[in-house]
Image (cartoon, grey):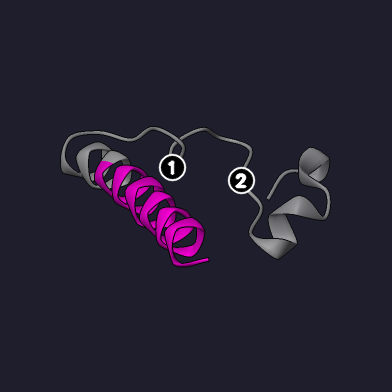
Amino acid sequence: QSKGAGLGGLSGADTGGVFTARRGIERVLFWVTITLSVIFFGLVIAILILSA
């Protein structure tokens, strides 16, 4: 461990962008999850409005 690492190295903090990139199936699942949640909440709001 270098002198300039500071406390970030002790807590496991990593400033590298290794885990921020979404590739392949992970990217597809991310967008499918977002899309399904938007559809779900849209349906919930529509049902609440129509049932009132």
Residue 42 position in % (x across, y down): 41, 49
Residue 8 relative to residue 22: left or right: right
Q: How many residues crowd mark 1 within 10 Å: few (<14), some (14–19), many (20+)? A: few
Q: Earlier in the sequence, mark 2 or mark 1?
A: 2
The front one of 39 and 31 is 39
Q: Nearer the viewer, mark 2 or mark 1?
A: 1
Residue at image position (70%, 54%) is: 9
Magenta part, dominant SS: helix
Q: How many residues crowd mark 2 within 10 Å: few (<14), some (14–19), many (20+)? A: few
Residue 30 position in % (x across, y down): 32, 44
Residue at image position (82%, 55%) is: 7
Quarter of the view holding residue 26: top left
The front one of 48 and 29 is 48
The front one of 27 and 19 is 27
Q: Which residues are magenta?
A: 32-52
Dot 2 amino acid type:
Asp
Residue 17 position in % (x across, y down): 51, 33
Dot 1 amino acid type:
Phe
Q: What number of labels is visible?
A: 2
Residue 14 disc label: 2
Contact, mark 2 vs mark 1 (Cβ under 8 Å): yes
Is label 2 in a helix, a strand or a loop? loop
Residue at image position (61%, 46%) is: 14
Quarter of the view holding residue 11: bottom right
Residue 15 position in % (x across, y down): 63, 38
Residue at image position (73%, 62%) is: 10
Residue 51 covered by magenta stretch: yes
Is label 1 in a helix, a strand or a loop? loop
For the residues labelled 2 and 1, the Cα–Cα distance comes to 10 Å
Residue extending farthest left: 25
Vertical placement of 51 versus 33: above or below? Answer: below
Judging by the rendered image, the residue that carries numbered circle 1 is 19
